Amino acid sequence: PTTEKELPVIDAAKKAGAEIFCMDAGWYADGTWWETVGEWVVCKKRFPNGLKEVFDYIRSKDMLPGIWVEPEVMGIGCPTLKQFDDDCFFMRHGKRVIDHGRFNFDFRAKKVRDFLDQMVDGLISDYGIGYFKFDYNIDGGIGTDVNADSFGDGLFKHHEAYFAWIDGIYQRHPDLIIENCASGGMRMDYRTLRHFSLQSLTDNSSFQQISCIATMSQTAVIPEQAAVWCIPKCNQSDAELAFVMVNAMFRRIHLSGETHRLLPRQMEIISEGVALYKSIRDEIPKLLPFYPLGIVHFESEWVCCGYKGVDKSYICMGHFGSRNTVTLELDHRIARCRCLYPKRNTAEIVCTNNNLSVSMDDNAAVVIEVDVGG
């Protein structure tokens, strides 16, 4: 990220209807950012007038500023590394654990927690950050043997200290939103997620594969906590752009991709999807997910998931392959059915008694609203 790159993306995010704008990785690095991570000082080359200029611009668009941070690691090339002793990191057999050019912090060390508290509080006070994307792009392995009966004991105590640190941030900043990205889908367990606002499902950028991952995600994460990348690209068809949005419609939309390069017609599809999501998101915690066509696999021709309410249900349908028709048998009589999204579509939807028949083209997806009959 640079100031020059960010400003047009911020404009596009606002136009699409985003409410939070989160700056991604690399804002601290002059050049490669991987092995220098951990100092958390703004790179002046990337932001000549500082980060405040960018975050003020985000707020001027009535969006909440957010930022990417990877607090659990420190790169082997980080300028701040010499300030930390061995007891601040995972150790095994007297040596620091290194994975992909990074050391893994041990959160039992007060020096680590104090350093990161200062970093988090500083970003909030200096720039008005309201959203943190906490990433974790290594694997510290089986744990640490420092002050522990075993590697696993050390790992468990470290995680307890890490979760306590997260809880402490919320105590100081109760309105803060913290995402557990964790390399896009690691630690998807409720020992972890009870301490976070939401969970990133995957870093996958294929809307076809994301559709399967997102559809099956509620077997692990409640929908209202599951964040799904929506990655629109300029070379995608209108139907594919709509598919991108349907993937996240009953979860948490994370809009990314080439939004700032989309044509007005393409942006209309994205903003229409965001508007629909905003209109139904308060219902999501009250809906019960179900699978009218059973479990979805990567090779499935149809991707389908339903969300059942008291007097109506929603059906998200995606299709791969030449135009085809499938019939869903629901457990209630259908009074009415209609396509909520996208407005421009070629799908044919017919309901009879408790059967819903859907015909769609290749790489197309729709959101269907079904009213329960008497």
Image: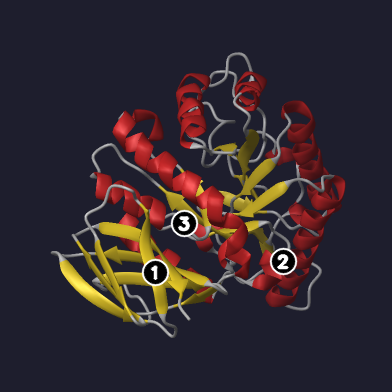
Query: Which amino acid type is marked by label 2?
Result: Arg
Label 2 crowd (10 A; few <14 / some 14-19 / many >=20) = few
Query: Which amino acid type is marked by label 3?
Result: Met
Q: Please tell me whether mark 2 sits on a helix, a strand or a loop.
A: loop
Pick out the residue farthest to the bottom: 331
Instruction: In this rendered view, identify the residue nearer to me: 321 or 105.
Output: 321
Q: Is residue 99 visible?
A: no
Is residue 251 toward the left or the right of residue 317 in the image? Answer: right
Residue 274 position in % (x across, y down): 48, 45
Mark 3, mark 1: which one is toward the viewer?
1
Q: Which circle marks residue 40 in the picture?
A: none
Is residue 199 toward the left or the right of residue 154 in the image? Answer: left
Q: Which circle marks residue 249 in the picture?
A: 3
First-in-chain label (3 vs 1):
3
Instruction: In this rendered view, identify the residue nearer to me: 218 or 351.
Output: 351
Q: Residue at x 59, y 19 (%)?
A: 44
User: Which residue has dot 2 on it?
Assistant: 194
* Marks 3 & 1, CB-CB < 8 Å contact: no
First-in-chain label (2 vs 3):
2
User: Which residue has dot 1 on it?
Assistant: 336
